[in-house]
Image: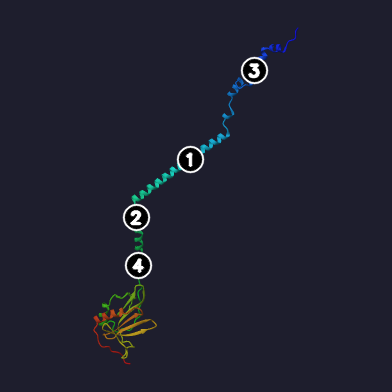
Amino acid sequence: MADSTPEDRDEASTPDDTATADATSSVGEPGSVGAKSSDDEPRSGDEPTSDDDAQAASAAATALDADSDGQADHAADADDSDSDVADDDFETHHSPALIATAVALPVVLIVAVLVAAFIALRAPVEREPLALGPVPAPAADGPACQALLPALPAELGDYTKATLVEPAPPATRAWQLPDGGDPITLRCGLDRPLEFNRASPLTVIDGVKWFQVRDEAGKTGTWFAVDRETYIALTVPDGSGTSAVQTVSDTINANLPAREPTPGEL
């Protein structure tokens, strides 16, 4: 048998070998069936990654914050609008007259309190009855004292008539300041003062001749009217002024006739 050549061997290849070779070749080519099946599988680029999730969460958070800020701005605008409306309502409902009244009312109350305090300070204080000791007054029940006492005024300057403790000395009157203190006293129907003599100096006040006796310890002065039917003594505390002597002089001169003094011997 003749030997076969290489060419003959190539031609003698079986159809199965050719099919096998074609199949193997088709696996490596992009257009082959194997490549197509690989396209049907999900690609790595199409799958969701962790970076995509983070970006989506961040975008959602940003949108939420923006929405929250918008709501806050809207709420602030609403509050400002309500405040403006309230201010407008206040200005509308509170007229200038009402505001002026609200301002003036405290001032009026303060003035009323001050006036009440002033009146309370000026109101007379309830004084205790004044006790006066007895002195010899033989003519206290005489006509001169009975004519003089009812004519005496209720006030001598700032001094007002005082109530005397009973039994009070006869033919006696007294006046005190509103808050009490040393009184002005008048006694009628007395004896001639021991100090009154021919050398005694006299003071004429409103037509009445007075002889004064000082009490330095008691800080008082006693004026004796010495030119009437009876002796009248008016005792005034130091610092009380001369209005008491002047007023009593007018009363004496209007109700008792004058006569010449009768001083004692030296």
The residue at which mark 3 appears reads as 23
Depth check, front residue: 161 or 47: 47
Residue at point 55%, 34% (across, down): 53
| Residue, disc 2 | 99
Q: Reading the chain from its start, which is encountered first: label 4 or label 3?
A: 3
> Is tag 3's residue or tag 1's residue first in the polypeptide sequence?
3
Kind of element beneath mark 1: helix
Mark number, residue 255: none
Say which mark, if any, is on residue 66.
Answer: 1
Query: Residue 57 location in percent, x, y?
Result: 53, 36
Q: Secondary structure at mark 4?
A: helix
Q: Could you tell me if the residues under marks 2 and 1 are in contact, i.e. CB atoms within 8 Å?
A: no
Mark 2 / mark 3, whichever is N-terminal: 3
Earlier residue among tags 2 and 1: 1
| Pair 4/2: label in front | 2
Marks 4 and 3, Cα distance to the nearest angstrom? Answer: 130 Å
Task: Give the Cα separation between the discs numbered 2 and 1.
Answer: 45 Å
The N terminus appears in which quarter of the rendering? top right
For marks 2 and 3, give the CA distance.
106 Å
Indicate which label's residue lies in the foreground, 4 or 1: 1
For label 1, count other residues whose C-alpha is less than 10 Å away and answer few (under 14), some (14-19) or many (20+). few
Residue at the spot 48% in from the left edge and 40% down from the top edge? 66
Q: Which of the two discs, 2 and 3, sits closer to the camera? A: 3
Asked which quadrant contains residue 148, the reply is: bottom left
Residue holding disc 4: 118
